[in-house]
């Protein structure tokens, strides 16, 4: 197939979210096998959403492709907790953001149920949880100002500041700062003193992935990935952590793994998290151009801990979908909502500085700190959370301790404008970049962002290797 036809298939003029089904179907079993159009071999490093998606696109063009994955599993930051409850309990990505993007459409195409999550947060103000409507009726003007700031973030036109400094400049009272932080910085994997307000605003302006937040109700997201990319799972070589990439030779690229084995290819797509790149876990020969590596310093990726707290019965308002607090976890969400009738679980998101502060603590210590926070918010009978706590079904999962991830999600730093595009510049038409940190449509830090980064990297590759 000619590049021109592939570009047509990628349908660059339609919203990115609509690309996915046509691409995956572009080599349906009924089609005659395509003739190889390129006799080289592509290696993809990492079997997360970006790596799987890129592999599928490349395989669809009948180009030889292999995925080298450091861990023993595919999915990367899409990961199920095992054992789980009567619904999928996700350790990484859980929300499907928006109803008009590749991820949402791909899941729907497989006939998997997605349920929209109602917007009903409880906000803790001065230690007391209330619904938004109650705080508006009261009225709590500090809360209202904070909510207006969140609602207008997309239109932010001020200087490039941290979100915290922007909130201070907007004269939001300190007692309501967590309302902004929990809704805006926490889902991005950052605390508000690190993330750029301009970066957040730019992302919102670029976002074209549709409305709403959804949960997959009956299948875990890693099962979903498995069924979407079933075709390429056999191309993954597991337990193969790449430690060096030597692209000195103009024809072949030599990759060495941590077991001392070498792998040869003609092109490589790197999809590992930016924290892995920053850590120096992979050495490049020759060293990467400064244009790529200097961009890494303008993109953040901090710690992220998901804590699953299970209770004998629920003590929070049954209709709350999230609880925004002033404590260690700025947001607790209710993973069972729309998935089960027995809502007994809260998932705490501890990110950024708060996650780093937990580094030396045991799982039990982390859970006790969160229970103390919840006891203070729900004080009846000396602490409802501690009384109702079911330790046997509660878990701590620290993403910064995962050797091949080292954090939560990428996020924009102050002065980070353009950094993702710069990081993603291909090197000598042979080394290509995908992965959520290189997503350019305001959707980094999401699964669909990872997939769209793979769309872009595959196009860049096809541009070079396929006949014009
Ligand atoms: C706690 C948490 C909550 C999240 N919540 C959401 C959410 O609700 N909704 C949403 O859309 N997104 C969410 N995300 C973000 C989403 O999970 C990621 O954006 C997406 O999964 C990233 O995919 P990726 O392919 O870019 O990277 P990854 O999934 O990280 O894949 C990279 C792969 O590279 C492998 N690797 C690393 N180093 C090497 C090496 N040296 N050699 C070979 N392989 C290597 C890793 O093992 C990994 O499998 C969340 C993430 C976290 C951590």
Image (cartoon, grey):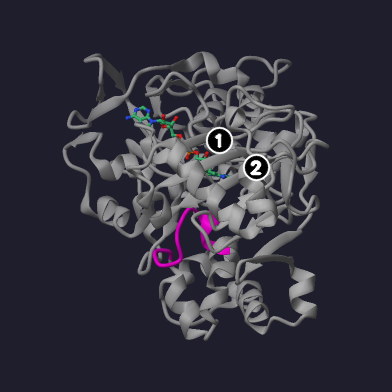
Viewer-nearest of discs 1 and 2: 2
Q: Classify mark 1: residues with Cα within 10 Å, few (<14), some (14-19) or many (20+).
A: many
Q: Quadrant of residue 57?
A: top right
Residue 442 picture location, percent across and down:
54, 58
Residue 285 picture location, percent across and down:
17, 35
Magenta segment: 184-195
Q: Specify the label residue 2 is tagged with.
A: none
Q: Nearer the viewer, residue 416 or 378?
A: 378
Q: Please name the residue that numbered disc 1 is placed on.
A: 91
Q: Is residue 184 above or below residue 262?
A: below
Q: Quadrant of residue 103?
A: top right
Answer with left or right where residue 260 lies relative to residue 274. left
Residue 416 appears in view? yes
Residue 421 picture location, percent across and down:
41, 55
Q: Nearer the viewer, residue 403 or 344?
A: 344
Instruction: Residue at 29%, 17% (x, y): give it.
Output: 263
């Amino acid at each position: 197939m000619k590049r021109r036809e592939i570009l047509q298939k990628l349908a660059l003029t339609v919203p990115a979210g609509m690309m996915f089904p046509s691409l995956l179907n572009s080599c349906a079993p009924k089609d005659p096998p395509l003739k190889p159009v390129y006799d080289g071999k592509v290696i993809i490093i990492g079997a997360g959403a970006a790596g799987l998606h890129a592999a599928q696109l490349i395989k669809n063009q009948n180009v030889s492709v292999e995925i080298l994955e450091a861990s023993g599993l595919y999915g990367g930051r899409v990961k199920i907790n095992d054992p789980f409850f009567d619904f999928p309990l996700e350790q990484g990505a859980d929300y499907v953001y928006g109803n008009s993007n590749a991820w949402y459409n791909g899941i729907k195409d497989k006939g998997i149920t997605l349920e929209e999550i109602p917007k009903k947060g409880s906000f803790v103000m001065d230690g007391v949880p209330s619904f938004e409507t109650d705080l508006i009726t009261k009225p709590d003007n500090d809360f209202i100002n904070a909510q207006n700031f969140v609602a207008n973030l997309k239109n932010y036109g001020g200087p490039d500041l941290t979100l915290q400094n922007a909130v201070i400049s907007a004269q939001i009272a300190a007692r309501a700062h967590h309302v902004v932080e929990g809704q805006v910085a926490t889902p991005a994997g950052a605390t508000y003193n690190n993330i750029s307000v301009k970066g957040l605003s730019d992302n919102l302006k670029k976002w074209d992935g549709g409305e709403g937040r959804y949960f997959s109700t009956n299948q875990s997201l890693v099962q979903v990935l498995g069924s979407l990319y079933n075709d390429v799972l056999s191309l993954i070589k597991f337990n193969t952590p790449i430690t060096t990439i030597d692209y000195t030779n103009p024809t072949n690229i030599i990759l060495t793994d941590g077991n001392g084995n070498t792998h040869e290819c003609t092109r490589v797509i790197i999809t590992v998290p930016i924290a892995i790149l920053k850590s120096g876990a992979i050495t490049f020969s020759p060293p990467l151009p400064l244009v790529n590596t200097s961009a890494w310093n303008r993109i953040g990726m901090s710690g992220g801990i998901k804590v699953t707290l299970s209770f004998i019965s629920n003590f929070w308002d049954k209709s709350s979908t999230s609880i925004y607090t002033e404590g260690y976890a700025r947001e607790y969400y209710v993973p069972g909502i729309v998935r089960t009738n027995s809502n007994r679980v809260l998932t705490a998101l501890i990110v950024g500085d708060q996650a780093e502060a937990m580094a030396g603590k045991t799982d039990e210590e982390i859970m006790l700190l969160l229970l103390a926070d919840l006891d203070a918010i729900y004080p009846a009978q000396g602490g409802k959370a501690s009384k109702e706590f079911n330790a046997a079904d509660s878990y701590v999962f620290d993403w910064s301790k995962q050797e091949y991830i080292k954090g939560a999600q990428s996020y924009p730093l102050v002065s980070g404008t353009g950094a993702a595009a710069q990081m993603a510049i291909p090197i000598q038409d042979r080394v290509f970049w995908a992965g959520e940190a290189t997503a350019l449509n305001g959707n980094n830090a999401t699964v669909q962002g990872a997939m769209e980064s793979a769309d872009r990297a595959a196009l860049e590759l096809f541009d070079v290797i396929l006949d014009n």
